[in-house]
Image (cartoon, rainbow, N blue to C red):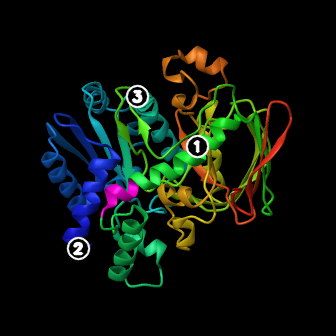
Amino acid sequence: MSPELLRKYAETVIKIGVNLQPGQKLVIKSPIETSEFARTLSSIAFDAGAEDVIIDWKDELHSKIRYLKAQEKVFETFPAWQKDFHMQLAQEGAAFISIAANDPELMKDVNPEVLMKHQKTINTALQEYRNRLMGNQNAWNVIAYPTKSWAKKVFPELSQEYAVEKLGEAIITSVRADLLDPVAAWEIHKKSLKERMNFLNHHQFEKLHFQSSLGTDLTIQLPAGHLWTAGAEVTQEGIDFIANMPTEEVFTLPHKDGANGKVVSSKPLPYNGNLIEDFSLTFQNGKVIDCTAAKGYETLKGLIETDEGSHRLGEVALVPYDSPISNSGILFFNTLFDENASCHLALGKAYPVCLKDGHKMTPEELSAAGVNESLVHEDFMIGTSDMSIIGITKDGKEIPVFKNGNFVD
């Protein structure tokens, strides 16, 4: 990636992604392989007036060594200093950027039970921090940058060097950083997404019925007072930010007890360094009662059994099949991208900001309103070229929302 493109990408993330404010702190969570991008982000952030920039480096290769060789008991505890690190900076109003660039199958040789145990330990320790971000108390943003192992998974037929270059081009295009004025392009894109959002909020559907030729036949109830959101989100202090770059979705929360039927995946799901492929979930009164998978069944089962809330849905998101990432024809093996090429659902925690006054409610009030709570929030893709979605109003009227994979205009 040329220095000019790298800088334009970083400027887009700082100005549009987290919308960093003068005097604000920034935390960047970065794999060591993406250090060049992390440092560029840091430089741009200081130019924008950041008080300080802290980089939290991650080494997934060392993580694999640790999973394979450390005593299992070390994965049952989480260092207090790491919890304090996240909470102190969050309480000080820091913005958070995470660079998602994992090898999607790095952990395939690691015992999935150890992975799930450690993930649960981490999520439990950082639950308050995660609640802050999912409640939009802090601006946050997830982005990506090409790494060698990830690029070779996406483009196995290419040389490593060319695969990295090709993946970099795809990332840059997806976040509009290749355009003359990416910031202006994002403003236009946000307005387009808002039109879809307003349509859905206007109708306040009671239920959505999903069908596809893969076998999906699922009805999802939406809670009273649900809010669709898209593009820019807003912190409780009124600062716009984009949580995911790229983003093509319009999303809300389902009622935790309101999913019934079967849903079939349309893309592989990378989770904990493993791929789950060709899987299905069957729901009854909101809860998963059966699951299948051609590959990664134990990983899928472990995800579902994380806690009570991970048996239920926390997000429903609509993405047209005819969208930039989908039209690229690239399977990224990275949820950040693949979820923006496909309608998707999420197992686990719901976003309280997707319910009217949800950010003001107690956990008990949220639960009573149908909002799901969990230690996890994991998106999986269900969209297809023939996806049909019917919106059902409170008086039983049926309104087509999607036909042949796209919004009905």
Q: Is 346 inside the magenta-drawn segment?
A: no
Name the image quarter holding residue 71.
top left
Dividing the image into 4 quarters, which one contains the C terminus? bottom right
In the picture provided, is 394 more to the left or to the right than 252? right
Q: Which residue is mark 2?
A: 2
Looking at the image, residue 299 lies above or below residue 177? above
Amino acid carrying mark 3 in the image:
Arg
The main secondary structure of the magenta stretch is: helix
| Few, some or many residues within 10 Å of mark 2 (<14, 14–19, 20+) | few
Chain-order first, disc 2 or disc 1: 2
Residue at coordinates 34% horizontally, 56% vertically from top-left? 184
Amino acid carrying mark 2 in the image:
Ser
Q: Which residue is mark 1?
A: 197
Q: Which mark is residue 261?
A: none
| Few, some or many residues within 10 Å of mark 1 (<14, 14–19, 20+) | many
* Residue 292 horizontal/vertical position (percent): 74, 54
Question: Taking the image as drawn, is residue 313 in sight?
Answer: no
